[in-house]
Amino acid sequence: MKILIGQSYFRILDPKEMKRNMPYPPLGSLYAAALLKAAGHEVIFFDAMLSRGVNDFISQIAISKPDILLIYDDEFNYLTKMCLSKMRSAAVSAISEAKVLSIPVLIYSSDAADFPAEYFSAGCDAIIYGEGEETLLETVKVFAENYFLSTRENINGLKFIKDNSVFTTSGRALISDLDSLPNPDYTFVDLPAYQNIWRKNHGYFSLNISTTRGCPYSCNWCAKPLYGRTYSSRSPKHVAGQIKTLKEKYSIDHLWITDDIFGLKTNWIKDFSSEMKRQNTIVPYKCLSRPDLLIKGSTLNDLKESGCKTIWIGAESGSQKILNAMDKGITVEQIYEAAKKARKLGIEIAFFIQFGYLGEDWNDIKLTRKMILDNLPDDIGVSVSYPLPGTKFYHIVKQQLNAKTNWLDSDDLDMLFHGSYERNFYKILHRFVHAEYRAKKIFSKKIFKDFPHLIFYLIKLVKLRVQLSSYLKNKKINIAIQ
């Protein structure tokens, strides 16, 4: 069959990401393309990440006239997992165009799994949920044989409309051997274009890979629509071999390992480090882990020896009260210890910070600011609590949600529920915390050439402090901004 694969995440619709200029190819979609190609299908690939907009996708549908339109989102990318409403609108536009041309449409995305009615109303024929690859192959096969309507109820991992309501088949068992999957096929995307953007703006070229699927932890705001609380890994030898190929074929300078948790199994990290050295393929990389894992045994040393340059941790809050409310399963002390140990080894440490969780007050915010300034991580990412379907957090605040259930783009920062403060407060706080952090970081280095930047951030801090105070005063909230 001739299959057109596209995605719903259009970077051009996300101003924050356009400004960062750090695009990564849609990894999940490239897995699907490689799988369909290996099964003998003709694959046409539309890369929404670098496209000029939704109209390009619509034009591609009309030009290609595929047997099936497949919208297969990159669920390895946190931007896709955020389920942004601009991207949902983009997907709906593409589906509508395909239906005008009588082209069947399959979709695989967290948002479609959570809000299927939005996609079926546009004309989608079926939604794949859970782990996508095997369900995709089976569904495409019955479409090719014209047996979809008569056999769809027997395909595990599928949603479709039956008798005017959403019918969901049984869940599919997860793939037991991830090494059996073909590696993502980067020839489907314009890799030189990615290289140019990276090297022009950052001086190096970074690509993305995944080594695991799933996360066994129970942070109650974290959605797990695909793998639940499971965790499976590719073999260290297989991963190192893929990295070696990327290094030799595409001259990569850096990797983003997209795993929700990298370094969960200490023996895996040790073996991975050994394989990277054995295959002579060390490449600097960034990954995401947890502070409690990093302080165990030789984990940090093994990460360092395998090429790890930067570790992002979900620090979230400097208040133990809030960490406990989130069911994070970590302590503030572990965050401090992990940052200290990573720095000692020369590994960069970065913090994800989340404001606005239930019960958070100004004292909790002050503790988070203190944690940032005490540790001065190499980078920070600041957001606000975002309720996603399927989470305990979503269940708690569900009755508070209005018509708007998703952010428009990744810089929306809207409080979709009734938190301690409102959206405008957190928008100002976001900029305030960044300015405070940047000023302290520059001051701590005591580099004369950075003095103008220090003055810039200090002036910005004064202005933002006034804005915060004015906001609180207007809301009759008695807090002294310190």
Image (cartoon, rainbow, N blue to C red):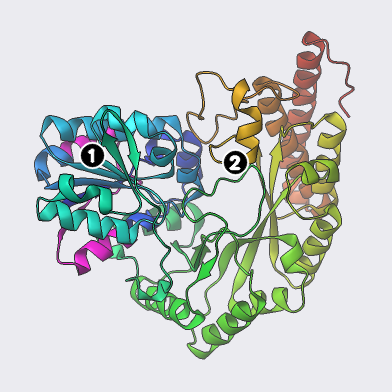
Q: Does the magenta stretch include residue 32?
A: yes
Q: Position of residue 86 (x, y in %)?
A: 40, 30
Residue nearer the viewer, 211 or 121: 121
For the C terminus, give its image quadrant: top right
Q: Position of residue 75 (x, y in %)?
A: 43, 51
Q: Reply above or below: 449 against 391.
A: below
Name the residue rendered at 55%, 33% in the picture. 411
Q: Reply above or below: 239 against 30.
A: below
Q: Reply above or below: 59 against 142.
A: above
Label 2: how many residues lie within 10 Å, few (<14), some (14-19) or many (20+)?
some
Q: Is 372 left, or right, of 157 in this rendering?
A: right
Q: Name which residue type carries label 1.
A: Asp
Name the residue rendered at 68%, 32% in the picture. 431
Q: Name which residue type carries label 2.
A: Thr
Name the residue rendered at 43%, 80% in the picture. 238
Q: What stretch is highlighted in magenta?
A: 31-59
Residue nearer the viewer, 91 or 396: 396
Q: Quadrant of the rendered structure where residue 194 is?
A: bottom left
Q: Is 180 left, or right, of 16 in this rendering?
A: left
Name the residue rendered at 42%, 71% in the picture. 178
Q: Is residue 457 magenta?
A: no
Q: Is mark 1 on a helix, strand or loop?
A: loop
Question: Which label sits on residue 284?
Answer: none
The residue carrying mark 1 is 125
Q: Reply above or below: 429 against 374.
A: above
Q: Quadrant of the rendered structure where residue 333 is?
A: bottom right
Q: Can residue 224 be seen in this view?
A: yes
Residue nearer the viewer, 342 or 289: 289
The residue carrying mark 2 is 391
Q: Position of residue 391 (x, y in %)?
A: 59, 41
